[in-house]
């Protein structure tokens, strides 16, 4: 499986999951997500998928500081509804990382490990996403805006050719390369695109 090499340069997200520990899935419940893991589950790499990954990464670092984030113990809130814009795509990525779901997640065992009702849409927040720890109620707001890092001007023209089925194979390949170059550029300038309050 070939993919852009910059995927592997993006910082991994480390968490501890008591359910994984209980079921013997990962030793002591320690789990690590790479950007490549998320790309595989999303089926593609784009500024939105990367942004969701970075919001989770930077948000959880700020929320837990010197502790490891606790998967399944994090509330996630979005201002948008799940069908608005790309909120659903972002939510799916963050669900994979945090375990939080609205009502489709794991129901728990004897009252523990319930992953439902940890995600809320149309929440009264001003950020893209808000993360809250269940154990102490600390929270962080995370903002993501990649607009300061534009893609190559040829991307739009090439996309139109592809959508109209008028692109050559070389143009299709060039489009993919240019698309991922923008994603890579965003990944290299996290401080410009992510703000955590």
Image (cartoon, rainbow, N blue to C red):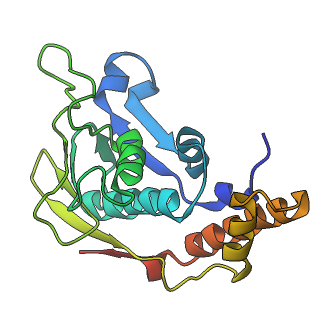
Q: Left or right: 191 with respect to 116?
A: right
Taking depth in this image into account, of 169 and 178 the one nearest to the observer is 169
Taking depth in this image into account, of 1 and 136 the one nearest to the observer is 1
Residue at x-position 20% and y-position 62%: 79
Q: Position of residue 165 (x, y in %)?
A: 77, 56
Q: How many marks?
A: 0
Q: Does residue 71 lie above or below 12 as drawn?
A: above
Q: Does residue 28 lie above or below 12 as drawn?
A: above
Name the quarter where the N terminus is drawn: top right
Q: Position of residue 36 (x, y in %)?
A: 61, 47
Seen as rendered, the residue at the extreme bottom is: 148
Q: Position of residue 31 (x, y in %)?
A: 45, 37
Taking depth in this image into account, of 167 and 121 the one nearest to the observer is 167
Residue at x-position 53% and y-position 65%: 47
Q: Position of residue 158 (x, y in %)?
A: 74, 70
Q: Does residue 25 lie above or below 9 as drawn?
A: above
Q: Left or right: 53 with respect to 196?
A: right
Write down the quadrant of residue 180 in the picture. Answer: bottom right
């Amino acid at each position: 499986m070939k993919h852009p090499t910059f995927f592997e340069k993006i910082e991994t997200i480390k968490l501890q999951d008591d359910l994984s520990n209980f079921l013997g899935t990962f030793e002591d419940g320690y789990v690590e997500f790479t950007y490549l893991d998320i790309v595989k589950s999303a089926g593609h790499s784009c500024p939105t998928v990367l942004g969701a990954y970075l919001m989770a990464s930077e948000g959880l670092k700020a929320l837990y500081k010197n502790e490891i984030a606790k998967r399944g113990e994090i509330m996630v809130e979005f201002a948008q509804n799940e069908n608005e814009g790309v909120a659903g795509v972002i939510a799916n990525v963050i669900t994979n990382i945090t375990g939080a779901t609205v009502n489709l997640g794991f129901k728990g065992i004897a009252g523990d490990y319930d992953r439902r009702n940890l995600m809320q849409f149309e929440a009264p927040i001003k950020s893209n996403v808000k993360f809250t720890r269940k154990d102490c109620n600390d929270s962080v707001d995370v903002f993501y805006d990649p607009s300061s890092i534009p893609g190559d001007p040829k991307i739009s023209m090439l996309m139109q050719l592809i959508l109209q089925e008028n692109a050559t194979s070389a143009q299709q390949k060039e489009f993919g390369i240019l698309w991922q170059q923008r994603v890579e550029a965003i990944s290299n300038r996290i401080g410009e695109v992510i703000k955590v309050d």
